Amino acid sequence: MGLEIKENEILANHSTFRIGGPARYFIIVKSKGELMEAIEFAKESGLPFFVLGGGSNILFRDEGYDGIIIKIQNSELKIGNSGVEAGAGVPFGRLINFSIENGLAGLEWGTGIPGTVGGGVAGNCGAYGHSISEFVKSVIVLGENGEIKNYSADECGFVYRGSRFKNPDNREIILEVEFNLEKGDKGKSEKVIQKILEDRKSKIVPYPSTGSIFKNVIIDGLENKDEFLELVPREKIKGGKFPAAWLIENCGLKGKQIGGAKIAEEHCNFIINADVWRATSDNVLELIKLCKQKVREKFNIDLKEEIVIV
Ligand SMILES: Cc1cc2nc3c(=O)[nH]c(=O)nc-3n(C[C@H](O)[C@H](O)[C@H](O)COP(=O)(O)OP(=O)(O)OC[C@H]3O[C@@H](n4cnc5c(N)ncnc54)[C@H](O)[C@@H]3O)c2cc1C
């Protein structure tokens, strides 16, 4: 086998949180063939596997992962019939730049979102009123039995910050994504990007994190909608969602620290690794528990994690 299989690789080095113990095995795959070899290795060893993109939406536990982490790094990018075709391992920022360089517009809103195309599609990442699902034409995946499948966007089960691929029971691995993009104007796109970069700069939390810990609250999905709307300022609702950050802040948790992990002062839906390399996954999990408990008590709302805990 030509694959490089590392043992006891420290996962903190593969997560933007900079938290996480060792993986029993860690394999970087750069092609469909390598991915198939890695899956074969998983089958032979009888160990579970977890698919990793950029590690920007994951909390790895300190005890590590007793299985195989397969990091997806296939990075082909090409112009397709309707826009761009990208390997799942392409960094999302590179996809945006490549599209603009080739006179295609649509993905500018994603500027500043870390991670890969595969991770972005699995989690249906979004910002500034858009989400990636609006631009997905089709997704090529490696199925559980080694078969290649091609899903249309409708078949991907996209929901707010999720898809069929983010479901832990789903064993399909995204290999490639075809995007629908419009003909654009490079100058205009660059201006939009500049604006977003400035806006994001003003919100930057200068510590390792995974971005938002919790999903915002979908108002229409609430059983106690009327009761909830009596308790919160309605003008905060955007796109039918109420910010989890406001709920956490209004439970008095801004700046709350447990061990090395802290609820960011700048944005209460961010937990930061404030004491870099000293925060533990338990510190973060305790803060998550505390946020859920306080928000439940005060607003009768069950916050749901956006991040994946491994
Ligand atoms: C500073 C900061 C800012 C952020 N801002 C935003 C934001 O504005 N909007 C937003 O939506 N998110 C944001 N995020 C969160 C994160 O960047 C996104 O969720 C990103 O799309 C995750 O991609 P990833 O490649 O890092 O995925 P990972 O964290 O590696 O994985 C996330 C999930 O996707 C799955 N996955 C990854 N690759 C594949 C694949 N090829 N096939 C199947 N499943 C796969 C994993 O198994 C896991 O379940 C932010 C994070 C940080 C640190």
Image (cartoon, rainbow, N blue to C red):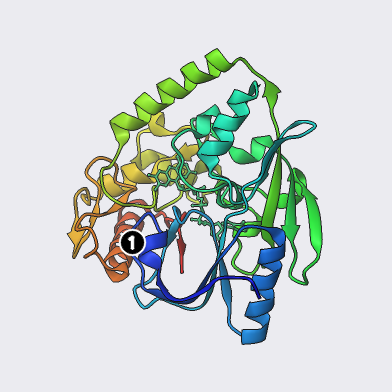
Q: Secondary structure at mark 1?
A: helix
Q: In the figure, is residue 44 to the left or right of 241?
A: right
Report x, y in % for residue 88.
63, 50
Report x, y in % for residue 156.
71, 51
Q: Residue at x 63, y 78 (%)?
A: 42
Residue 286 visible here: yes
Q: In the figure, is residue 37 to the left or right of 150?
A: left
Tell which of 299 and 19 is nearer to you.
19
Q: Residue at x 61, y 48 (%)?
A: 75
Per the image, the residue denoted by label 1 is: 288
Report x, y in % for residue 261.
24, 59
Q: In the figure, is residue 199 to the left or right of 74?
A: left
Tell which of 169 and 57 is nearer to you.
57
* Local crowd size for mark 1, using a 10 Å CA cut-off: few (<14), some (14–19), many (≥20): some
Report x, y in % for residue 10.
38, 70
Q: How many marks?
A: 1
Q: Residue 278, located in which quarter of the rendered image?
A: bottom left
Q: Quadrant of the N terminus?
A: bottom right
Which residue is the extreme one toward the front? 2
Identify residue type, mark 1: Ile
Ligand 1 within 8 Å of the CB at mark 1: no
Where 173 falls versus 64 (above or below)? Answer: above
Q: Residue 76, located in which quarter of the rendered image?
A: top right
Q: In the figure, is residue 215 to the left or right of 233?
A: right
Where 1 falls versus 193 (above or below)? Answer: below
Residue 305 visible here: no
Q: Residue at x 39, y 75 (%)?
A: 22
Q: Residue at x 47, y 16 (%)?
A: 191
Where 250 falls versus 185 (above or below)? Answer: below
